[in-house]
Amino acid sequence: MNDFISLHDCTPEQISGLLELAIKLKKEQKAGIPHPLLKGKTLGMIFTKSSTRTRVSFEVGMTQLGGYPLFLSSNDLQLGRGEPIYDTAKVLERYLDGIMIRTFSHQDVLDLAKYADIPVINALTDLLHPCQVLADLQTIYEKKGALKGLKLAYIGDGNNMANSLLYGCGKMGLDCAVATPAGYEPDAEVVENAKGDFAASGASMLLTQDPAEAIKDADIVYTDTWVSMGMEAEKAERVKLFMPYQVNGALFAKAKDDAIFMHCLPAYRGYEVTEDVIDGAHSVIFDEAENRLHAQKAVMATLMG
């Protein structure tokens, strides 16, 4: 692996290797065993889109690996003033050992990886969120003891989370059912790519407008905010449209009795999910959030070690 941009680019074996390393690093960290695998290395962290979990987990993770995390906001870079990505990439590769970027345009990440001769990690774009799904797969494995053969139901907006979950489930053999309103389906190119992943693993993919159909017999129920960063002007319209897709107690009851509830956070109780579900006994959202730290450490150690 040279970069970590999309789970679709990874083989199932590579994803399994990352998950095994993440679980190993988590056990060591809990036991107080240091693992300075990136001692002397520096990770540049480019943020044109802010985040609580992404910044904290990458900074802490890089520190625990013995390296140095360098935070770079859009105010710290010349990209916002028109410097070509090529120039930025060629300069940063002379200073850094790796680049993490969280931004809006997926093409910017592809260009950065194309031009920089150091590893690039996609920490989120409007198209994909692979680091989150890697942590999700780790969480599912920890809770269920397996991945292949399980069913994940995603209810809500066909956004970057839905896109990356299709890739992650397809690669690792989980059945995936996605329920969205008409016109809010996952990205068409992602769906086409994912069909090959599902065919290879033998798992099934379902796209539907019926949340009850999607959630039937699900082992994992997943949702995300209806109003992603940059869509605030659409909030009133989106809330009205998506309310039938709210994961509430009645809908969650249609999943398996031992189903777990997942959400990448931040969550808005009373909108995409009700309090009884997200704060209930089946919710694993904080274990899931913690695993961002461990999964991303595995990615950094693998790419930059």
Image: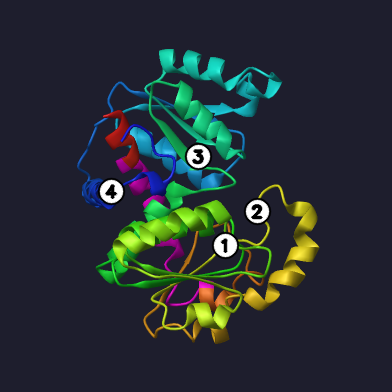
Secondary-structure class at tag 4: helix
Segment tinted magenta in the rendering: 278-298
Callout 3–callout 4 Cβ contact below 8 Å? no
Give the residue at mark 1: 224
Amino acid on which the number 3 mark rests in the picture: Arg
Callout 1–callout 2 Cβ contact below 8 Å? yes
Give the residue at mark 3: 55
User: Which tag, 1 or 3, sits closer to the chain's start?
Assistant: 3
Amino acid on which the number 2 mark rests in the picture: Ser
Give the residue at mark 4: 22
Amino acid on which the number 4 mark rests in the picture: Ala
Q: Is residue 266 above or below residue 57?
A: below
Q: Is residue 87 above or below residue 298?
A: above
Q: Is residue 283 magenta?
A: yes
Q: Position of residue 215 (x, y in %)?
A: 49, 79
Between tags 3 and 2, which lies in front? 2
User: Which tag, 3 or 2, sits closer to the chain's start?
Assistant: 3
Secondary-structure class at tag 2: loop
Q: Position of residue 25 (x, y in %)?
A: 25, 46
Q: Residues within 10 Å of mark 4 (few under 14, many from 20)?
A: many
Q: Which of the pair 65/33 is nearer the observer? A: 65
Amino acid on which the number 1 mark rests in the picture: Asp
Q: Position of residue 263 (x, y in %)?
A: 50, 63
Q: Which of the pair 187/164 is nearer the observer? A: 187
Q: Residue at x 33, y 47 (%)?
A: 294
Describe residue 33's horizontal placement relative to residue 140 as left or right: left
Give the residue at mark 2: 228
Q: Is residue 138 above or below residue 82?
A: below
Q: Position of residue 30 (x, y in %)?
A: 25, 51
User: Which tag, 3 or 4, sits closer to the chain's start?
Assistant: 4
